[in-house]
Image: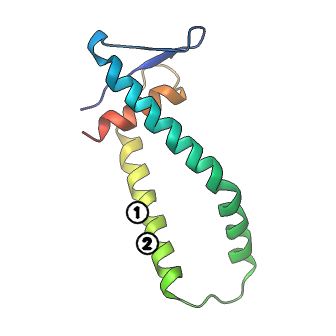
Amino acid sequence: MSVTLKVDGSQGELCGNKNSGELCAIAMQFQQQVDHDIGQLLPRMHGLSNTIGDMMHLNLTKDVLEFQGLIETIGSQLEQLLKEVRCEDSPDMATIGANLFFASY
């Protein structure tokens, strides 16, 4: 199921099916949590990327392999969810977040 929801920039309210208010609120909470978590991770991930890029050799430890698997899983999940996003106009973050939430059903 994919539902396109929009945010009225001036009001900051979700617009859509009148019965979808609670689901929209949940979707926005998920999106806010994801945005927060990504915001916390990005600086460290950029630093790690730079460090790995400067290395000549990396030992394949258990943690390195687990990290690689997790990165691949997250990449696949994002790719699948983003394929299901359908925006009629220019995408805004609430539209994308709501579609990501509803696409998982």
Q: Quadrant of residue 6?
A: top left
Q: Residue at x 45, y 58 (%)?
A: 75
* Of residues 11 and 80, the one drawn nearer to the viewer in this rendering: 11
Q: Is residue 47 above or below residue 38?
A: below
Label 1 sits on a secondary structure element that is helix
**61 sits to left or right of 54:** left
Is there any visible trace of residue 20 in the rendered image?
A: yes
Q: Position of residue 46 (x, y in %)?
A: 70, 61
Task: Identify the image quadrant of the N terminus.
Answer: top left
Q: Position of residue 48 (x, y in %)?
A: 68, 69
Q: Quadrant of residue 49?
A: bottom right
Q: Residue at x 52, y 36 (%)?
A: 32
Q: Position of residue 89 (x, y in %)?
A: 48, 19
Q: Quadrant of residue 97?
A: top left
Q: Is residue 11 above or below residue 100?
A: above
Question: Count of labels shown?
Answer: 2
Mark 2 Cα shell of 10 Å, populated few (<14), some (14-19), many (≥20)? few
* Numbered mark located on residue 93 in the image: none
Q: Residue at x 65, y 62 (%)?
A: 45
Which kind of residue does numbered mark 1 sit on?
Thr
Q: Do tag 1 and tag 2 residues touch (Cβ < 8 Å)?
A: yes
Mark 1 Cα shell of 10 Å, populated few (<14), some (14-19), many (≥20)? few
Judging by the rendered image, the residue that carries numbered circle 1 is: 73
Task: Identify the image quadrant of the C terminus.
Answer: top left
Judging by the rendered image, the residue that carries numbered circle 2 is: 69
Label 2 sits on a secondary structure element that is helix
Q: Is residue 87 above or below residue 36?
A: above
* Of residues 55 and 30, the one drawn nearer to the viewer in this rendering: 30
